[in-house]
Amino acid sequence: MAITSQPQRLAFPLTLELESKELPERSWVEISQIRTLFLERIEKKFALDTPEELAQVIEGLNEIIGDA
């Protein structure tokens, strides 16, 4: 999913503000912007800080695609 430092106009479930201390500035994950990348293109890995953030991302994704 795309990560941006631009303030978001649309809120959850489309975006979620990240609390990661690894990111250089205030950032949001754009849950609706799913991408696939070759591993060779990934220069640096980022991880969500908490299981709660990961759960919120999954919840937002389920809102977008629909719970089965």
Image (spheres, grey):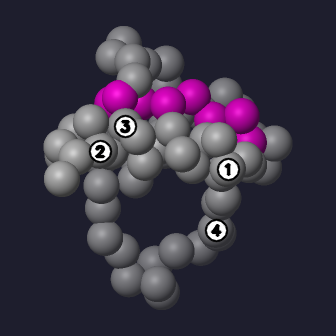
First along the sequence among labels 3 and 1:
1
Say which element carries label 2.
Answer: helix
Query: In front: mark 4 or mark 3?
Result: 3
Q: Spatial distance from mark 3 to mark 2, Cα to Cα?
A: 5 Å
> Do the CB atoms of the residues marked 2 and 4 lie less than 8 Å apart?
no
Residue 60 to residue 35: above or below: above
Query: Disc 3 marks which amino acid?
Result: Gly
Q: State left or right for residue 28 relative to residue 10.
A: right
First along the sequence among labels 4 and 1:
4
Residue 23 can be seen in this image: no
**Residue density around tag 4, few if under 14, some if 14–19, many if 20 or more, within 10 Å:** few
> Do the CB atoms of the residues marked 4 and 1 lie less than 8 Å apart?
no
Q: Which residue is mark 4?
A: 45
**Going by the picture, which residue comes out furthest to the bottom?**
40
Give percent across and percent down for residue 8: 42, 19
Quadrant in the picture for residue 63:
top left
Q: Residue at the spot x=71%, y=34% of the render?
A: 19
Q: Nearer the viewer, residue 32 or 66?
A: 66
Q: Which residue is mark 3?
A: 60
